[in-house]
Image (cartoon, rainbow, N blue to C red):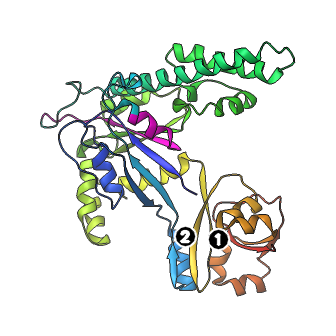
């Protein structure tokens, strides 16, 4: 599954530094706006101790973790919705992502300039919200104009529903409310999804803090929490400069010692990757054996045939059944053969909803 998270924010808030920590692809990082012009793309491995454990048991020739694509997008400024700065490019790039990691500067440092001259993460958030809302307003208004022509046909009930949802969203956008924060019924949400609106994308606010605030945050972070309390959004605290130092260390032991010295249990980027995975409503199932232990990404709630199709479309087309072993049972018994002997392999059909951590083997015929 080609899943993308876009790192966005005003210029010079730490986006590229964070991207460099996350990815082996190194973005240029400097103390001036628009350092990143073309979007940098990195394929990020999702850390999963379960895959490591399965590999220890089966000793496969190859281990393949699951991944999420991270895109470092050029900084946005006021007027982006009208093409100011790199606005048109920014909006095109963000439209292609599945979720947004919105980096907010939550630290003081006179040596690092801010595009607006002062530190105010809530204001920075609102600048980007405003520009994205303006673009969504343009999209919705265009949809309203289009559907109004269809309303001339009194029998077109679908057009009436689309018009009502688009009008409702327009009213809220005019109030400065992002689409993700608008209360919509399931049916209304289904219609709004067809608009592909920017402020409807899942968002995580990444508060970039100094070392002293890495564990519990600061007043800037508190202000962000208050500002987004009514949004369906997550907040993550991370010290990007510190994470850059950790990323430069070569061994696991060195990294753990560094983390202990600053009072953290794991790197902030690890939390961010897991949070991004959760933000996209993703889970993992596994296939494992002597040839390969592999993690597969799926959207929470899908059924077995669709999960099989992630491996290959033929698996879904010719799906017969799935043989499922629970991860805990596999680890406890130590092999597929032992699970089979103990009666711990469940035979599941087309209606089986795949669970996080399932070890799957698909039977199919094309």
- Residue 77 at x, y percent in the picture: 32, 27
Residue named by callout 2? 50
The single residue placed furthest to the right in the displayed view is 155
- Marker disc for residue 354: none
Q: Residue at x 39, y 36 (%)?
A: 89
Could you say which quadrant of the image residue 283 lies in?
A: bottom right
Disc 2 to disc 1, C-alpha distance: 8 Å
Query: Is the residue marked by circle 2 packed among few (<14), some (14-19), or many (20+) residues within 10 Å?
Result: some
**Which residue is the extreme one toward the left?**
111
Q: Which of 341/40 is in front?
A: 40
Q: Which residue is mark 1?
A: 327
Rendering coords of residue 117 (x, y %): 19, 24
Query: Does the stretch in magenta take in 86?
Result: no
Residue pictured at 37% horizontal, 24% vertical: 127
Residue 204: x and y, percent? Answer: 46, 40
Quarter holding residue 258: bottom left
Whether pointer 2 and pointer 1 mark residues with C-beta atoms closer than 8 Å, the reply is yes
Q: Is residue 51 left or right of residue 342?
A: left
Residue 261 in sight from this viewpoint: no
The answer to whether any part of residue 321 appears in the image is: yes
């Amino acid at each position: 599954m080609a899943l993308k998270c876009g790192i966005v924010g005003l210029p010079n808030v730490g986006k590229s530094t964070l991207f460099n920590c996350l990815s082996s692809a190194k973005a240029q990082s400097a103390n001036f706006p628009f350092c990143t012009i073309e979007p940098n793309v990195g394929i990020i491995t999702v850390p999963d101790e379960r895959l490591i454990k399965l590999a220890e048991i089966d000793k496969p020739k190859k281990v393949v973790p699951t991944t999420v694509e991270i895109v470092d997008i050029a900084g946005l400024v006021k007027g982006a919705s009208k093409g100011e700065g790199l606005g048109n490019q920014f909006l095109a790039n963000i439209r292609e992502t599945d979720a947004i990691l919105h980096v907010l500067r939550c630290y003081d440092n006179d040596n690092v300039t801010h595009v607006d001259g002062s530190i105010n993460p809530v204001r920075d958030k609102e600048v980007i919200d405003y520009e994205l809302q303006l673009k969504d307003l343009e999209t919705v208004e265009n949809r309203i104009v289009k559907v109004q022509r269809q309303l001339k046909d009194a029998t077109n009930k679908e057009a009436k529903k689309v018009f009502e949802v688009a009008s409702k969203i327009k009213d809220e956008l005019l109030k400065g409310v992002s689409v993700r924060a608008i209360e919509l019924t399931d049916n209304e949400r289904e219609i709004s999804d067809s608009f592909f609106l920017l402020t409807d994308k899942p968002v995580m606010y990444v508060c970039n803090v100094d070392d002293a605030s890495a564990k519990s945050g600061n007043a800037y972070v508190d202000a962000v929490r208050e500002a987004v309390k009514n949004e369906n959004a997550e907040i993550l605290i991370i010290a990007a400069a510190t994470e850059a130092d950790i990323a430069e260390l070569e061994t696991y032991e060195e990294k753990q010692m560094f983390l202990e010295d600053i009072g953290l249990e794991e790197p902030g980027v690890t939390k961010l990757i897991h949070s991004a995975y959760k933000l996209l409503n993703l889970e993992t199932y596994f296939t494992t054996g002597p040839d390969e232990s592999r993690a597969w990404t799926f959207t929470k709630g899908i059924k077995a045939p669709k999960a099989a199709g992630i491996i290959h479309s033929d698996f879904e087309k010719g799906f017969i059944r799935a043989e499922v072993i629970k991860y805990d049972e596999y680890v406890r018994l130590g092999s597929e053969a032992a699970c089979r002997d103990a009666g711990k392999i469940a035979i599941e059909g087309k209606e089986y909803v795949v669970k996080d951590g399932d070890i799957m083997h698909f039977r199919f015929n094309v």
